[in-house]
Image: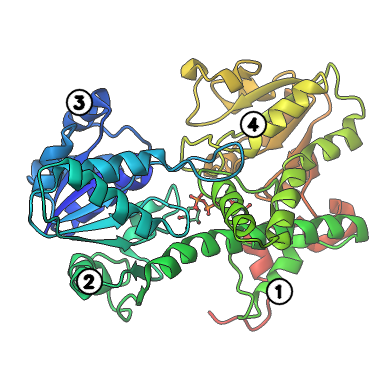
């Protein structure tokens, strides 16, 4: 099928590349001419494991192209994806001006042939009908007197760092539309994914496709992200109670997660959630609720719990170091999660602000953030080239992002470079006993000190061994 993806940010580019990979003819449009040139030369403007290679392979196969000309994209595509950003405004509402501009542009360029216009951007609930109106307005200014199109909401559920895997192995595909013609075309588009032709486990039953009205599809996206964020805030709150009563949140999470009604995912306590989706989407849902006269108290508490949780490492540091003024704290990791270079709404940024406010000197090492990144929010810290350089002269380390390479560091060497080796494991990611053996005072989140409760010494994998008679 002929597909046009408008906007080559994270969602747009991943969507375009993956649709080309499953055999469609894809043209990606972006109004940033420099970015288009970069992509035309075969380079990905974002870091996502496997994306660059898949992008060049599909360009070479003649299935993937890039252009800055919206007219070319609209002419070519039978299915037009709107995948531009909807950043949060200071009020918490979504800024929809880019969606509006693209919808109007599509309308202006419509040429009579039938098109499915797909909202892939996370747009405020109710935007489907609004987009339809804007396209019609655009068409009135443009060249088509009888525009023929339908609007579909098709939310994405991709996680950064595993976006390609998530695209080919989705838990479900949601298609929101009232048009049978559009729904049918969307089903054809996703058929190779639904039948698991590109899946890791191709023998599994087909991927469920949920067909809904536009508004329900839009709400599913917000509700899914808000639920996941609430689940994390919940376990973080339980972790804070664990801290006070001497329980271990990793064991508690295991114990509740074995209940299939609860499920074991997204129960990893730590220094809170961040990224480009959760903060923006939970705030937008609260905002929508308010607009419609409802006080979404639970979601507000989800946000507030997370705001506090992002600074939990400071409490832990103060318990050990007391005064932070004049102390040096080293951050292992900066990005909001591993396998991405994304710093959007990363807990590290709040931590840096607070530590520097308290007079501490902050150093950081992140595998994908280098000292020449020129980010104003990192200007007040020292970025090092490796963990060894980071630890040298530090009073304490904080593990902020669970990069795999942090499990393989020579912690005895790092300890030898520090005066009184202390580490706050902000993701409960490291093996507490190994760290203690390496000479560190190890402090987890929601876990009692090592000497008080033996299972706390276990890594997540070892905790699995505590489950007697676990199915192999
Ligand atoms: C999320 C959703 O998972 C995805 O479906 C949606 O389309 C976009 O938003 P992403 O932001 O890439 O994806 O990251 P995710 O893996 O969901 O993690 C979000 C944040 O929650 C990260 O900061 C992560 O560290 C944190 N997190 C996640 C926890 O603190 N504990 C957990 O158990 C899981």
Residue 85 sits above or below residue 224 on the image: above
Residue under the point 23% across and 44% down: 138
Residue under the point 83% across and 23% down: 358
Disc 2 designates what residue? 187
Q: Nearer the viewer, mark 1 or mark 3?
A: 3
Gap between marks 1 and 3, in whole Å? Answer: 50 Å
Gap between marks 3 and 2, in whole Å? Answer: 32 Å
Asked if disc 3 and disc 4 are in contact, CB closer than 8 Å, the reply is no
Gap between marks 3 and 4, in whole Å? Answer: 32 Å
* Occupied quadrant, residue 6: top left
Assess mark 1: CB under 8 A from ligand 1? Answer: no
Q: Residue 275, image x and y in percent? A: 54, 43
Gap between marks 1 and 2, in whole Å? Answer: 37 Å
Is residue 466 visible in this depiction of the protein?
Answer: no
Pointer 4: residues within 10 angstroms few (<14), some, or many (20+)? some
Asked if disc 4 and disc 2 are in contact, CB closer than 8 Å, the reply is no
Q: Residue 223, image x and y in percent? A: 54, 64
Disc 4 designates what residue? 349
Determine the secondary structure under disc 1: helix
Mark closest to the chain's N terminus, 3 or 4:
3
Q: Nearer the viewer, mark 1 or mark 4?
A: 4
Is residue 247 visible in this depiction of the protein?
Answer: yes
Residue under the point 89% across and 29% down: 321
Mark closest to the chain's N terminus, 1 or 4:
1
Q: Which mark is residue 256?
A: 1
Pointer 2: residues within 10 angstroms few (<14), some, or many (20+)? some
């Amino acid at each position: 099928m002929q597909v046009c993806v408008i906007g080559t940010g994270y969602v747009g580019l991943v969507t375009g590349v993956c649709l080309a990979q499953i055999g469609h003819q894809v043209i990606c449009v972006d109004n940033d001419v420099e970015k288009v040139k970069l992509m035309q030369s075969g380079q990905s403007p974002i870091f996502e494991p496997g994306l660059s290679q898949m992008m060049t392979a599909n360009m070479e196969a003649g299935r993937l192209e890039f252009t800055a000309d919206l007219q070319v994209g609209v002419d070519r595509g039978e299915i037009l994806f709107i995948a531009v950003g909807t950043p949060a405004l200071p009020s918490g509402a979504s800024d929809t001006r880019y969606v509006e501009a693209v919808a109007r542009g599509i309308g202006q360029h419509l040429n009579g042939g039938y098109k499915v216009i797909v909202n892939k951007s996370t747009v405020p609930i109710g935007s489907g009908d609004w987009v339809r109106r804007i396209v019609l307005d655009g068409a009135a200014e443009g060249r088509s007197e009888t525009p023929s199109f339908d609007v579909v909401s098709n939310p994405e559920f991709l996680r950064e760092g595993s976006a390609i895997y998530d695209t080919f192995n989705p838990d479900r595909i949601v298609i929101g539309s009232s048009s049978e013609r559009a729904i049918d075309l969307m089903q054809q588009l996703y058929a190779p994914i639904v039948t698991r032709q590109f899946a890791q486990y191709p023998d599994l039953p087909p991927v469920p496709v949920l067909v809904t009205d536009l508004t329900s599809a839009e709400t599913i996206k917000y509700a899914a992200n808000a639920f996941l964020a609430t689940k994390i805030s919940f376990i973080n709150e339980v972790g804070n109670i664990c801290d006070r009563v001497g329980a271990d949140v990793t064991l508690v999470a295991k114990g509740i997660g074995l209940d299939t009604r609860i499920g074991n995912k997204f129960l990893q306590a730590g220094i809170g959630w961040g990224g480009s989706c959760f903060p923006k989407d939970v705030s937008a849902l609260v905002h929508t609720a308010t607009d419609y006269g409802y006080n979404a108290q639970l979601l507000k508490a989800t946000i507030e719990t997370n705001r506090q949780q992002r600074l939990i490492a400071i409490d832990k540091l103060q318990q050990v170091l007391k005064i932070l003024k004049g102390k040096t704290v080293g951050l292992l990791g900066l990005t909001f999660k591993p396998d991405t270079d994304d710093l959007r709404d990363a807990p590290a940024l709040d931590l840096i602000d607070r530590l520097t406010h308290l007079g501490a000197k902050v150093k950081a090492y992140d595998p994908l953030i280098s000292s020449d990144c020129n980010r104003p929010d990192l200007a007040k810290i020292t970025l090092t080239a490796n963990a060894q350089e980071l630890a040298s002269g530090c009073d304490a380390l904080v593990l902020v992002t669970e990069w795999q390479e942090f499990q393989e560091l020579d912690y005895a060497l790092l300890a030898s470079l520090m005066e009184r080796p202390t580490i706050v494991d902000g993701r409960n990611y490291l093996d507490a006993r190994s760290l203690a053996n390496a000479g560190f005072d190890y402090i987890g989140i929601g876990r009692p000190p090592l000497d008080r409760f033996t299972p706390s010494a276990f890594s997540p994998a070892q905790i699995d061994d505590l489950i007697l008679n676990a199915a192999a």
